[in-house]
Amino acid sequence: GVRSSLGGRAGTVSTLSTPVPLQTSALLMGDTPAILASNDVGLVWTAVWWLSNYGCPGLVERVMAFLPARAAARAALNILRATLVASRVDAAVARYPGVIAAPLLLGALGGAGGKLASDPLLRAVGAAPPRAPTEFSAPGLALRSAFIGAGLQYLLAHVSHVLAPAEAG
Protein backbone atom coordinates (compact mmCIF):
# COMPACT_ATOMS: atom_id res chain seq x y z
CA GLY A 1 0.00 0.00 0.00
CA VAL A 2 0.90 3.65 0.15
CA ARG A 3 2.08 3.32 3.72
CA SER A 4 4.71 0.72 2.87
CA SER A 5 6.02 2.83 -0.02
CA LEU A 6 6.27 5.85 2.28
CA GLY A 7 8.23 4.06 4.99
CA GLY A 8 5.43 2.58 7.12
CA ARG A 9 5.06 -1.01 8.26
CA ALA A 10 5.49 -3.21 5.20
CA GLY A 11 2.56 -5.35 4.18
CA THR A 12 -0.10 -3.63 6.28
CA VAL A 13 -2.85 -1.51 4.87
CA SER A 14 -5.23 0.34 7.12
CA THR A 15 -8.90 -0.18 6.41
CA LEU A 16 -9.51 3.48 7.17
CA SER A 17 -6.84 4.72 4.75
CA THR A 18 -9.25 4.38 1.82
CA PRO A 19 -11.79 7.07 2.81
CA VAL A 20 -9.16 9.58 4.03
CA PRO A 21 -9.52 11.70 0.82
CA LEU A 22 -13.26 11.86 1.48
CA GLN A 23 -12.75 12.81 5.10
CA THR A 24 -10.22 15.44 4.13
CA SER A 25 -12.41 16.91 1.41
CA ALA A 26 -15.32 17.06 3.88
CA LEU A 27 -13.12 19.00 6.28
CA LEU A 28 -12.17 21.49 3.57
CA MET A 29 -15.51 22.02 1.82
CA GLY A 30 -18.26 24.38 2.83
CA ASP A 31 -18.57 28.08 3.48
CA THR A 32 -16.09 27.97 6.35
CA PRO A 33 -13.93 24.86 6.13
CA ALA A 34 -14.50 22.81 9.28
CA ILE A 35 -10.78 22.36 9.81
CA LEU A 36 -10.42 26.17 10.03
CA ALA A 37 -13.54 26.76 12.15
CA SER A 38 -11.98 25.36 15.32
CA ASN A 39 -8.59 24.15 16.52
CA ASP A 40 -10.26 21.06 17.98
CA VAL A 41 -11.29 19.69 14.57
CA GLY A 42 -7.76 19.66 13.20
CA LEU A 43 -6.29 18.24 16.40
CA VAL A 44 -8.88 15.47 16.70
CA TRP A 45 -8.59 14.57 13.00
CA THR A 46 -4.79 14.40 13.24
CA ALA A 47 -4.88 12.33 16.44
CA VAL A 48 -7.40 9.85 15.04
CA TRP A 49 -5.48 9.57 11.76
CA TRP A 50 -2.20 8.95 13.62
CA LEU A 51 -3.72 6.40 16.01
CA SER A 52 -5.48 4.51 13.23
CA ASN A 53 -2.36 4.34 11.07
CA TYR A 54 0.54 4.14 13.51
CA GLY A 55 -0.59 4.11 17.15
CA CYS A 56 -2.27 0.74 17.63
CA PRO A 57 -0.94 -1.85 15.18
CA GLY A 58 -3.77 -3.97 13.84
CA LEU A 59 -6.50 -2.38 15.98
CA VAL A 60 -8.35 -0.81 13.07
CA GLU A 61 -8.19 -4.03 11.08
CA ARG A 62 -9.53 -6.04 14.04
CA VAL A 63 -12.39 -3.60 14.68
CA MET A 64 -13.29 -3.39 10.98
CA ALA A 65 -13.30 -7.19 10.71
CA PHE A 66 -16.34 -7.11 13.01
CA LEU A 67 -19.34 -6.96 10.64
CA PRO A 68 -21.50 -4.46 12.60
CA ALA A 69 -18.55 -2.05 12.89
CA ARG A 70 -17.85 -2.35 9.17
CA ALA A 71 -21.54 -1.79 8.34
CA ALA A 72 -21.73 1.25 10.63
CA ALA A 73 -18.57 2.73 9.09
CA ARG A 74 -19.89 2.25 5.55
CA ALA A 75 -23.27 3.73 6.48
CA ALA A 76 -21.59 6.78 8.05
CA LEU A 77 -19.32 7.18 5.03
CA ASN A 78 -22.25 7.09 2.60
CA ILE A 79 -24.27 9.53 4.71
CA LEU A 80 -21.27 11.86 4.65
CA ARG A 81 -20.98 11.53 0.87
CA ALA A 82 -24.70 12.17 0.34
CA THR A 83 -24.63 15.22 2.60
CA LEU A 84 -21.56 16.54 0.81
CA VAL A 85 -23.15 16.06 -2.63
CA ALA A 86 -26.39 17.76 -1.53
CA SER A 87 -24.60 20.72 0.03
CA ARG A 88 -22.41 21.22 -3.06
CA VAL A 89 -25.45 21.06 -5.36
CA ASP A 90 -27.34 23.57 -3.21
CA ALA A 91 -24.32 25.89 -3.05
CA ALA A 92 -23.87 25.72 -6.84
CA VAL A 93 -27.55 26.49 -7.45
CA ALA A 94 -27.31 29.51 -5.15
CA ARG A 95 -24.07 30.73 -6.73
CA TYR A 96 -24.93 29.99 -10.39
CA PRO A 97 -28.72 30.33 -10.73
CA GLY A 98 -30.15 28.91 -13.96
CA VAL A 99 -27.01 26.96 -14.87
CA ILE A 100 -27.66 23.21 -14.95
CA ALA A 101 -24.07 22.01 -15.40
CA ALA A 102 -22.72 23.76 -12.29
CA PRO A 103 -24.67 21.80 -9.66
CA LEU A 104 -24.13 18.53 -11.49
CA LEU A 105 -20.39 19.07 -11.85
CA LEU A 106 -19.76 20.50 -8.38
CA GLY A 107 -21.98 17.91 -6.70
CA ALA A 108 -20.20 15.09 -8.50
CA LEU A 109 -16.78 16.52 -7.63
CA GLY A 110 -17.81 16.90 -3.98
CA GLY A 111 -19.09 13.35 -3.77
CA ALA A 112 -16.16 11.74 -5.55
CA GLY A 113 -14.31 12.17 -2.28
CA GLY A 114 -10.93 13.14 -3.61
CA LYS A 115 -10.77 10.05 -5.81
CA LEU A 116 -9.97 12.24 -8.81
CA ALA A 117 -7.01 13.73 -6.94
CA SER A 118 -5.81 10.55 -5.21
CA ASP A 119 -5.38 8.52 -8.43
CA PRO A 120 -2.65 10.79 -9.86
CA LEU A 121 -0.95 11.01 -6.46
CA LEU A 122 -0.90 7.22 -6.10
CA ARG A 123 0.59 6.94 -9.59
CA ALA A 124 3.21 9.56 -8.73
CA VAL A 125 4.47 7.60 -5.73
CA GLY A 126 4.25 4.28 -7.58
CA ALA A 127 1.49 2.84 -5.39
CA ALA A 128 -1.17 2.47 -8.11
CA PRO A 129 -1.47 -0.68 -10.22
CA PRO A 130 0.57 -0.09 -13.40
CA ARG A 131 -2.18 -0.31 -16.01
CA ALA A 132 -5.28 0.44 -13.97
CA PRO A 133 -7.38 3.28 -15.39
CA THR A 134 -7.82 6.42 -13.35
CA GLU A 135 -11.22 7.53 -12.05
CA PHE A 136 -11.20 10.39 -14.56
CA SER A 137 -10.57 8.21 -17.63
CA ALA A 138 -12.86 5.34 -16.56
CA PRO A 139 -15.39 6.58 -13.97
CA GLY A 140 -16.01 4.04 -11.25
CA LEU A 141 -18.55 3.80 -8.47
CA ALA A 142 -17.35 6.93 -6.67
CA LEU A 143 -17.80 9.34 -9.57
CA ARG A 144 -20.85 7.69 -11.12
CA SER A 145 -22.80 7.51 -7.85
CA ALA A 146 -21.85 11.09 -6.99
CA PHE A 147 -23.08 12.29 -10.39
CA ILE A 148 -26.36 10.37 -10.02
CA GLY A 149 -26.78 11.75 -6.50
CA ALA A 150 -26.10 15.29 -7.72
CA GLY A 151 -28.67 14.85 -10.48
CA LEU A 152 -31.28 13.53 -8.08
CA GLN A 153 -30.64 16.34 -5.57
CA TYR A 154 -30.93 18.93 -8.33
CA LEU A 155 -34.12 17.45 -9.77
CA LEU A 156 -35.86 16.72 -6.46
CA ALA A 157 -34.84 19.82 -4.51
CA HIS A 158 -34.52 22.54 -7.14
CA VAL A 159 -36.64 21.53 -10.14
CA SER A 160 -39.64 19.66 -8.72
CA HIS A 161 -39.30 20.99 -5.11
CA VAL A 162 -40.20 17.58 -3.66
CA LEU A 163 -37.30 17.86 -1.19
CA ALA A 164 -36.07 20.91 0.68
CA PRO A 165 -32.51 22.02 -0.11
CA ALA A 166 -29.93 20.59 2.30
CA GLU A 167 -29.07 23.96 3.83
CA ALA A 168 -32.70 24.50 4.84
CA GLY A 169 -32.63 21.29 6.91
Image (cartoon, rainbow, N blue to C red):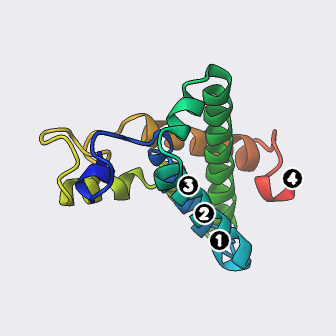
The location of residue 10, given as percent across then percent down, is 27, 45
Q: Label 1 near label 3: C-beta < 8 Å? A: no
Q: Amino acid at mark 3?
A: Leu
Write down the residue under mark 1: 43
Give the mark, 3 or 1, whose residue is nearer the N terminus.
Answer: 1
Q: Amino acid at mark 1?
A: Leu
Q: Label 1 near label 4: C-beta < 8 Å? A: no
The location of residue 49, given as percent across then percent down, is 54, 57
> Would you say residue 157 is visible in this rendering?
yes
Write down the residue under mark 4: 169
Does residue 2 appear to the left or right of 86 in the view shown? Answer: left
Estimate the spatial distance between the alpha carbons at disc 3 and disc 1, rounded to whole Å: 12 Å
Q: Amino acid at mark 2?
A: Ala
Closer to viewer: mark 3 or mark 1: 3
Give the mark, 4 or 1, whose residue is nearer the N terminus.
Answer: 1
Write down the residue under mark 3: 51
Is disc 1 placed on a helix, strand or loop?
helix
Q: Residue at x 63, y 55 (%)?
A: 89
Give the mark, 3 or 4, whose residue is nearer the N terminus.
Answer: 3
Does residue 123 appear to the left or right of 155 in the view shown? Answer: left
Q: Residue at x 54, y 25 (%)?
A: 65
Estimate the spatial distance between the alpha carbons at disc 4 and disc 1, rounded to whole Å: 28 Å
Q: Label 1 near label 2: C-beta < 8 Å? A: yes
Q: Amino acid at mark 4?
A: Gly
Does residue 169 appear to the left or right of 165 in the view shown? Answer: right
Seen as rendered, the residue at the extreme top is: 67
Residue 47 is labelled as 2
Q: Label 2 near label 3: C-beta < 8 Å? A: yes
The location of residue 39, given as percent across then percent down, is 70, 78
Q: Nearer the viewer, residue 30 or 2?
A: 2
Is disc 2 placed on a helix, strand or loop?
helix
The location of residue 69, given as percent across then percent down, is 66, 29
